[in-house]
Amino acid sequence: MSKPILWIVIPCYNEEQVLPITAPMFLEKIHSLTAQGLVSDKSRVLFVNDGSRDKTWELIQGFAAQDEHYIGISQSRNRGHQNAVLAGLMEALHSDSCDITISIDCDGQDDINAMDEMVKKYLDGAEVVYGVRSKRDTDTFFKRFTAESFYRLMNWMGAEVVFNHADYRLMSRRALQNLESFGEVNLFLRGVVPMIGYKTDKVYYERAERFAGESKYPLKKMLAFAMEGITSLSVKPIRFITSTGFVIFVINLLMLIYSLVRYFMGATIPGWTSLAVSVWAIGGLQLLAIGVVGEYIGKIYLETKHRPKYIVETYLHRDE
Ligand code: UDP
Ligand code: MG
């Protein structure tokens, strides 16, 4: 088997402070992987400029002029991290000269050395290899707490995500082809990639601090991101409304019995019985009705995503 061509895909948004430090590290990694005989020398470092307003794109152009291993694409405007990663992955897929991609942030927080292990796991047959943070000691307590609650909440809400895995992952050409067949506009890669299936593996690494510059993910963006993940992967919030409606409706029946008992005992003032019962009955019925309407909207929502209904891994009767 010839050596796989690796493209390292790196989204960059206003990263002029950190790129001069990390870009040479990525190139160095390609050289070392090549020297170990793990990947082909035709491997590339692909920068995706996500509409930066600083000198990021000028820097990328400079790298590309220096060494043929550096390449780049620039987006027409800022579209957010997820879309920047997808743009890079699809560029790699359509280049026809890329066998595997590894997506990674450009700030040095994800340990570049985990790539060796990732490629080895690919060579052992894994089509997707997730980079998982084993420790987050360098993150502040607040960041760690909010981030880990985020993964728990996601799973609890019915979105399957790999715990403590961000978007540092290896994907094979085949996995990318299938990723492309997902018709999502509201993209949440961490939830979609596990849906692809195939043989997957994990590589653990310690998350470091940013080498320079500031995080582009303040709390506000993280909350929006969590919301995006939940609403684009699960219709559980609608289920909550339906079940709350059901519970209130049951309470209503109990209230009915209670009020009638009180009424016949003569322990109520006129009008209380009908009022008490109707408040619960109407409340419960309304929530139930909203929930039922919601169920249908949820179905329509999932239909509009045009996700592939199945992905075949192996054909016995076809030449691949
Ligand atoms: N990023 C991007 N577009 C954005 C925001 C961020 O391409 O709109 C990139 C950013 O340059 C970095 C990665 O996404 O490479 C992760 O961002 P950051 O390090 O700020 O997030 P954190 O690690 O703090 O969660
Ligand atoms: Mg970061």
Image (cartoon, rainbow, N blue to C red):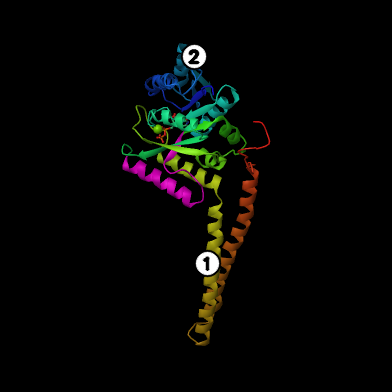
x and y percentages locating residue 186 in the rendered image: 56, 39
Ranked by sequence position, the earlier of labels 2 and 1 is 2
Q: Secondary structure at mark 1?
A: helix
Q: Which residues are magenta?
A: 140-168
From the viewer's perspective, is residue 251 above or below residue 30?
below
x and y percentages locating residue 81 in the rendered image: 49, 33
Would residue 191 be counted in the magenta stretch? no
User: Closer to the observer: label 2 or label 1?
Assistant: 2
Does residue 266 appear to the left or right of 304 in the view shown?
left
Tag 2 residue: 68
Mark 1: which amino acid?
A: Val
- The front one of 1 and 234 is 1
Report whether residue 48 is seen: no
Q: Secondary structure at mark 2?
A: loop
x and y percentages locating residue 56 in the rendered image: 45, 21
Image quadrant holding the N terminus, namely: top right
Tag 1 residue: 247
Q: Which mark is residue 192?
A: none
The residue at the far top in this view is: 66
Q: Residues within 10 Å of mark 1 (few under 14, many from 20)?
A: some
Mark 2: which amino acid?
A: Glu
Ligand 2: image quarter = top left
- The front one of 100 and 142 is 100
From the viewer's perspective, is residue 181 above or below residue 235?
above
Residue placed at 48% from the left, 41% from the top?
225
Residue placed at 63% from the left, 57% from the top?
293
Would residue 141 be counted in the magenta stretch? yes
x and y percentages locating residue 66 in the rendered image: 45, 12
Q: Quadrant of residue 59?
A: top left
Does residue 231 appear to the left or right of 34 in the view shown?
right
